[in-house]
Image (spheres, rainbow, N blue to C red):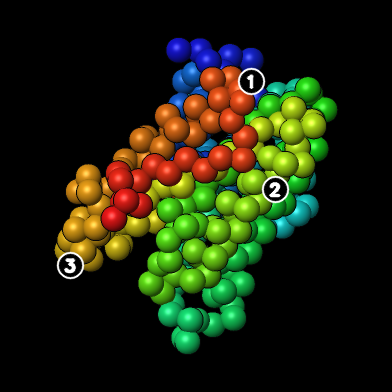
Amino acid sequence: ENRFAGKVAIVTGAASGIGYAIARRLVQEGASVLAADLNMERLEIIQGELGERFIGVKANVTVENDVEEMVGAAVKQFGKLDLAINVAGASRAGVITELSEKDWDFTVDLCMKGVFLSMKHEAIEIAKHGGGAIVNVASLNSQVPMYAGSAYASAKAGVEMLTKNGALEMARNGIRVNAILPGLIDTPLTAELLSNADIKEAYMERIPMKRAAQPEEMTGPALFLASEDAGYVSGSSLIVDGAWATT
Ligand code: NAD
C-alpha cells in the first residue's frame, strides 16, 4: 500500500518500540518521516536501514526550543508537514506516598508537556499546508489507574484531554487530533517488568487475550487515525489492549 505517498510526518520517540514501528511503517507506506528522539545513535542505525525518506534528529520533547527545531527540520528536509505521531514517553514509578517531586516532574513533563509542546508546533506548521492529522500515544492508563504509576497515569489522562482539546481547537485549520491507548506492549519500556515471571503472570491473568502486543500491532490503529479513512474521526481515543479494559 502507498497510503501516505507524498506525505511528510514527524514521529517522536522513534528510536525504539512503538515509535520505531510506526515510523518504519509510515516509510513503507510512502511517507517521508522526520524522526525525533534523544537516542541519536539508534536513529542513525535506523536511517541506514530505512533510507532517504527517514531522517533522524536529536530533540528533547520537553524543551520548547528543541521541538521548534524538530518541526523546522521537517520543513527544511521535506518541504512541509502533514502528519505527526507523538510517541515519546516514559515513567518513573512509586506509590504516591513515596513518589519524589523530581520523579513526578520528570514523568509529567515528558508524557504531558512533551505532547503539548509537540502538538503546538506541529499544528502551527500543519495548518500552513492545508491541514492534516496528529496522533498522540496515550495509554490504557489514561483511563485506568496503575499501582505506583500515578504520575504516568495522570499525565496520560492529560494526553487524552489534550487530544480532545486539540481536536476542538484545530478543526478549523483542517487538523484532526486523535489518540491511541495501548495496553501492554512488548518494548524496551516493559522488558524489565515482563522479565519477572510473577509480574508477567499477573498481567496475563488480567489481559483476556493472554499476551502482550508486539509494537507492530500499534501501527495499524495509529496509521488508520492518521489516514483519510479516518477523515471524520477527531478527538477520539482508540483503545488497543487485547480487551484488557473490559475486565
Ligand atoms: P520505548 O522506551 O521503547 O520508546 C520510547 C522512546 O522515547 C525512546 O526511544 C526514548 O529515547 C524516547 N524518549 C524518551 N524521552 C524522550 C524525550 N524527552 N524526548 C524525545 N524522545 C524521548 O517505549 P515504548 O514502549 O515504545 O513507548 C512509547 C510510548 O507508548 C510511550 O509514550 C509510552 O508511555 C506509551 N505506551 C507504552 C506501553 C507499553 O506497554 N510499552 C503501553 C501504553 C503506552
Residue 90 spot, x, y in % from top left: 49, 59
Q: Position of residue 68 (x, y in %)?
A: 77, 45
Q: Tell me residue 218's x, y (percent).
A: 41, 37
Q: Amino acid at mark 3?
A: Asp
Report if the beta carbon of the residue with label 3 is closer than 8 angstroms to ligand 1. no
Of badges 2 and 3, nearer the viewer stands: 2
Residue matched to label 3: 198
Q: Is residue 165 above or below residue 2?
A: below
Circle 3: element type = helix
Determine the CA span between mark 1 and mark 3. Answer: 44 Å
| Residue at the image position 49 percent from the left and 71 percent from the top | 150
Residue 141's place in the image compared with 171, above or below, is: below
At x 37%, y 35%, the residue is 216
Residue 164 lies left or right of residue 240; in this view the side is right
Q: Residue 140 vs residue 9: left or right?
A: left
Q: Which residue is mark 2?
A: 165
Q: Which mark is residue 17?
A: none
Comparing 80 with 73, the one in front is 80
Which residue is pictured at 63% across the width and 64% down the height?
109
Say if mark 1 contacts mark 2, CB within 8 Å: no
Choose the circle earlier in sequence order: 1 or 2.
1
Q: Is residue 185 above or below residue 84?
A: below
Location of the N terminus (image quadrant)? top left
Residue 129, quarter of picture: top right
Horizontal relation, residue 75 to residue 106: left or right:
right
CA gap, disc 1 and disc 2: 24 Å
* Cα distance between the residues tagged 2 and 3: 39 Å
In depth, the one of 185 and 183 nearer the eye is 183
* Total numbered circles: 3
Instruction: Judge the density around disc 3: few (<14), some (14-19), many (≥20) Cα neighbours within 10 Å.
Output: few
The residue pinned by badge 1 equals 7
